[in-house]
Image: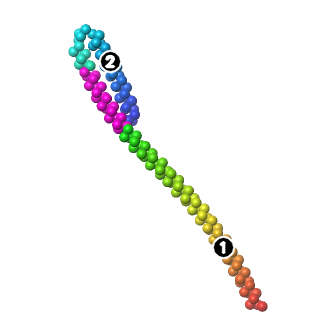
Amino acid sequence: SLEEQLDKMKSLLIQRESLLRKYQKRVSSNNHTGLLSQDDRLESCEKDNIRLNKMLAQAKIAYEKTEGRANSLEEAVNAQKAQTSKYQKEAKRLANELRNLSEAMRLMSQDMEQQMNRITTFVSSNRGA
């Protein structure tokens, strides 16, 4: 992963800087004998350090961009969850309202049936009288 690569680069950079310091100490304590080969190695290490620093900077930028995208996606997911929760609450409310209306219709139907029976009974009894 990107974090692992960053960690590897950091540790390699630390090792290179340590090696560079050792070379610098040797050069300063040495009586300038064999300086050419040490200078070559020192220059090579410095170039490696510059290259590694550039790679580390690029990796950090890529990591920050990725982290920003991940945060944006997380915010979008949270917004979707909140919206879904609202829809679920509204669906439950509408289901309860529908249940109540259905029950009211059933009771009204029963009441109308009873009234019709009374009217029929009343009309039947008045015809016979």
Question: In the rendered view, would you say 104 is above or below 20?
Answer: below
Q: Main secondary structure of the magenta part?
A: helix
Residue 24, image quadrant:
top left
Disc with the residue nearer the chain's start (1 vs 2): 2
Amino acid, disc 1: Met
Give the residues drawn in magenta, as a range: 43-63
The label shown at residue 24 is none
Q: Residues within 10 Å of mark 2 (few under 14, many from 20)?
A: few
Q: Is residue 43 left or right of residue 14?
A: left
Q: Classify the position of the N terminus by image quarter.
A: top left
Residue 74 image offset from top left, x and y in percent: 45, 45
Q: Check if residue 55 falls in the magenta segment.
A: yes
Q: Can you give x and y, in whole percent of width and height, for residue 89 in the image?
A: 56, 56
Residue 66 % position (x, y): 38, 40
Give the quarter of the figure containing the C terminus.
Answer: bottom right
Tag shown at residue 21: 2
What residue is shown at x 23% (from left), y 19% (from top)? 40
44, 75: nearer the viewer: 75
Tell me the kind of residue under disc 2.
Answer: Arg
Instruction: Identify the residue position indicated by label 1 in the image.
Output: 108
Task: State whether residue 125 is above or below residue 61.
Answer: below
Callout in the foreground (1, 2): 2
